[in-house]
Image (cartoon, helix red, strand yellow):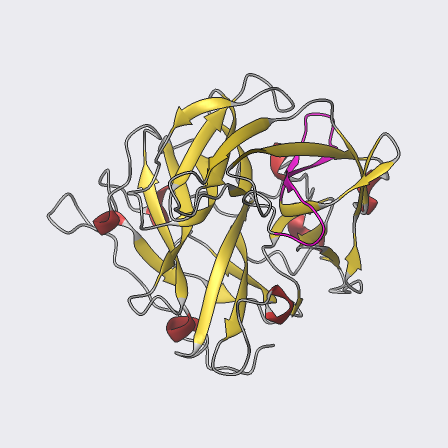
Amino acid sequence: MNSAFIFVFTLSSGCNTEGDPFPFNHNPLDTVPVADTGDTGDTGDTGDTGDTPLLTHNHWLSFFACDYDVKECNDRLNHQVQLAGSQDGITWEIIDWFDPYSSSVPDLIIHNKTLYMYGSPHLVKVDLTTGEHTEPEEIAIFDQGSQVYPADPSLIVDEEGNLVLFFLEGRIGGDPSTCENGEETCWLRFLSATAIDGDSGFEFEVDEGARLEVLVDLTNDEPDHASDPDIFMGPDGPILLISRGQRVEAYTSDTLRGSYAMLSPQVIQPGLGGVPSGFYEEETQEYWIYVTSYEVDRQRSLLQLGFTMDLTVEIPGEELIPIISGESHFNETYTVSSPGFWTQSTN
């Protein structure tokens, strides 16, 4: 358990009044189902939760934390992967049975009574019946025998129960989210890969073709990046979010392993959130969009949540709800980033 003081704050649910933190006049505590004890479908088929005593929350969030007063937080080797749980998606607590480990940009999925925590580049698995953790181990992704290096993993389970990993194609010795030195423009590829070792989750084979290719243009002498894919199921099929710095784009496809086309160029008001993770809540017909936003001093970041019923209409900054920050859950010198969301309700 992290020895830092943990403070969980609560935002009151509101009616349809000015300043209401919950748009669309709903109270998540009233609409989010309790933990499903049956088949959880695409989100990971945990089966009967009666023998998984650690599965105590409806919603789970991976992220990384770093104390910038002690460490150089621009170095991902100093990031610590953390796990939080929530009943409503808004009020979160740090999970004390999860052992933080050194890795970065994590995502998680719960499948067959096992928590899979994928960082960059290490996987840790937790048996939810015993609490036993595996040691962090690098995953291997192959493309016709050649190893591929993933960045920013995002997980989903396909209709056949296979683990599928979406990621930005990485490269050794450089920032994969932008062009190589000397290039003014370049195309970055977002790929998917399917597990080839069953539920082990350590070995994947790249699926045919790219899910998305994005043009990065540095000719204006301004930074341009594309990174941090997040895959989830929407009402009409899969949705892929990516980060363009502090801007979130949404793409959609007819099939999970198909080509993705632009749905929205800015899901969140530009400049106020990036590194996204999304979820579609069927009962309220809302999208929950978790993002990383800068604190006022821009040294630190925090995690925020916005709701929308239409991804083509950007979520304004005043409707973003802070959910986890260094000050609220660790201490004021911590920065937190890179949310990854999983839920027991249908994803």
| Picture layout, residue 218 above or below residue 126 | above
Measuring from the top left, give residue 259's x and y in whole percent.
58, 20
Residue at the spot x=69%, y=42% of the render?
Answer: 47
Viewer-closest of 127 and 324: 324
Residue 169: in magenta span? yes
Is residue 254 something one can see in this rendering?
A: yes
Measuring from the top left, give residue 245's x and y in whole percent.
42, 47
Is residue 347 something one can see in this rendering?
A: no
Q: Is residue 174 left or right of residue 161?
A: left
| Picture layout, residue 194 above or below residue 6 | above
Bounds of the magenta segment: 153-174
Measuring from the top left, give residue 130's x and y in whole percent.
76, 63
To which quarter of the image does residue 54 belong? Answer: bottom right
Viewer-closest of 225 and 327: 225
- Quarter of the picture holding the N terminus: bottom right
To which quarter of the image does residue 104 belong? Answer: bottom right
Residue furthest top in the image: 254
Residue furthest right in the image: 145
Residue furthest left in the image: 18
Exactly how many numbered labels are in the figure?
0
Q: Is residue 216 left or right of residue 54?
A: left
Q: Is residue 17 left or right of residue 293?
A: left
| Picture layout, residue 24 above or below residue 134 | above
Residue at the spot x=69%, y=46% of the render?
Answer: 171
Residue 210: in magenta span? no
Measuring from the top left, give residue 121's x and y in whole percent.
71, 55
| Picture layout, residue 77 above or below residue 268 | below
